[in-house]
């Protein structure tokens, strides 16, 4: 059945696709004077599993062309919309097609709900090498550009792509970063009275600081009454920040503040920690005790190798918990001091402290 003139069209895309039926409408014409030709400019309405669904979408669009249900469009649908236009302008699109396949964990997610943490996890768990991950990041950048142009997301959401860290992702020698599960967090709470150093793990989870930042933290930089502390030394410039103290870990801060040491966290002899001492003598034994880690024998190693949660996993846990509570990713970045935070903004972080405190108390 032929559709009316200017109504739009529905057609089936080639290849194996989850949503092979496209609905589109001509919204203008592009003139090519030297060729004495003109080409239609299409507006793609969406991609659907059946022809009937595509026709229904086209009918709905003609009734109200501004009601595009942008808040329900998935990652895969945005990719289909973008690729239908972009692939006509490049010779080799195989790299981007492979990158889309690598993005499979995101395919069915609503585009507007995708956060930095989702993208980072996708990259971290991809097992791909750096050149491949650069293509992946380029694909996401182009897709987010498209999404901004077509008002699927706001312009500030485009910035999340530059914060995706691919320096370690995919490296076969890199550690597998895995947040603590809710069950594991509960186990830490249930066992925390049995060992004072379990409180350190919980402080790490509920502040999002790096282990080095916590071990270097001096009491003079802690403002317990106002519920924040100042990280003055960090591996990145954006790591210099004011960190909110969640109400549920205030008792732990009060406990360690009573120790006779300039630093918050100290050894049983009330001396500052060196990382290796803390990791080997306290972190690993605690993880083994709670079955959150184990020693394994590897053929190429003379001694058993520890496998399990590492201190940096607490940082991922904090980000995951905040993301789950739908905290704005810009606030998350300011709390944990992610790379890419604007240095100028850091000057005014004290003005945002109430917002950060409200956010951290959600988890």
Image (cartoon, rainbow, N blue to C red):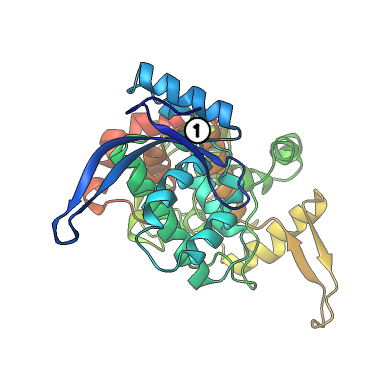
Q: Measuring from the top left, give residue 87's x and y in whole percent.
A: 41, 58
**Count of number-bearing discs:** 1
**Residue 314 visible, this orientation:** yes
Image quarter (top left, top right, bottom left or bottom right) of the C terminus: top right
Q: Measuring from the top left, give residue 80's x and y in whole percent.
A: 48, 45
Out of 307 and 81, give the one closest to the viewer.
81
Q: Measuring from the top left, give residue 73's x and y in whole percent.
A: 48, 33
Out of 169 and 52, give the one closest to the viewer.
52
Q: Is mark 1 on a helix, strand or loop?
A: loop
Q: How crowded is mark 1: few (under 14 residues within 10 Å), some or many (20 or more)?
A: many
Disc 1: which residue: 246
Q: Measuring from the top left, give residue 357's x and y in whole percent.
A: 41, 31
Quadrant in which residue 299 is drawn: bottom right
Q: Residue at x 85, y 73 (%)?
A: 297
**Residue 239 visible, this orientation:** no
Q: Residue at x 56, y 49 (%)?
A: 316
Q: In this view, does 104 lie to the left or right of 340?
A: right
Residue lying at the far front of the rendered structure = 1
Out of 254 and 105, give the one closest to the viewer.
105
Q: Is residue 16 left or right of residue 67?
A: right
Residue lying at the far top of the rendered structure = 63
Q: Is residue 332 left or right of residue 290?
A: left
Q: Which residue is drawn at 27% across and 51% down?
A: 342
Q: Residue at x 80, y 83 (%)?
A: 300
Q: Is residue 97 above or below residue 241?
A: below
């Amino acid at each position: 059945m032929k559709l009316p003139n200017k109504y739009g069209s529905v057609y089936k895309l080639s290849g194996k696709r989850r949503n092979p039926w496209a609905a589109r409408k001509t919204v203008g014409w592009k003139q090519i004077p030297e060729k004495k030709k003109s080409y239609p400019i299409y507006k793609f309405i969406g991609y659907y599993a059946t022809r009937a669904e595509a026709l229904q979408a086209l009918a709905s669009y003609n009734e109200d062309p501004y009601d595009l249900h942008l808040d329900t469009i998935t990652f895969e649908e945005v990719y289909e919309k973008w690729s239908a236009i972009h692939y006509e302008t490049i010779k080799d699109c195989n790299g981007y097609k492979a990158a889309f396949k690598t993005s499979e964990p995101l395919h069915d997610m609503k585009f507007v709900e995708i956060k930095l943490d989702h993208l980072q996890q996708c990259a971290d768990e991809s097992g791909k090498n750096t050149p491949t991950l650069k293509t992946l990041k380029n694909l996401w950048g182009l897709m987010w550009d498209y999404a901004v142009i077509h008002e699927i997301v706001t312009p500030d959401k485009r910035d999340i792509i530059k914060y995706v860290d691919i320096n370690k992702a995919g490296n076969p020698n890199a550690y597998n970063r895995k947040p603590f599960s809710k069950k594991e967090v509960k186990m830490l709470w249930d066992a925390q009275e049995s060992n004072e150093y379990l409180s350190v793990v919980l402080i790490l989870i509920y502040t999002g600081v790096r282990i080095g930042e916590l071990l270097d933290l001096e009491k003079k930089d802690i403002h317990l009454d106002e519920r924040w502390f100042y990280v003055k030394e960090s591996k990145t410039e954006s790591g210099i920040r004011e960190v909110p103290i969640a109400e549920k870990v205030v008792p732990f801060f009060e406990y360690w503040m009573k120790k006779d040491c300039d630093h918050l966290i100290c050894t049983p002899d009330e001396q500052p920690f060196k990382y290796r001492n803390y990791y080997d003598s306290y972190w690993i034994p605690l993880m083994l005790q709670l079955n959150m880690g184990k020693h394994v024998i590897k053929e190429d190693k003379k001694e058993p190798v520890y496998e399990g949660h590492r201190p940096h996993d607490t940082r991922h846990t904090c980000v995951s918990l905040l993301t789950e509570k739908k905290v704005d990713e810009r606030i998350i970045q300011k709390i944990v001091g992610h790379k890419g935070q604007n240095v100028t903004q850091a000057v005014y972080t004290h003005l945002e402290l109430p917002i950060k405190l409200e956010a951290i108390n959600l988890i």
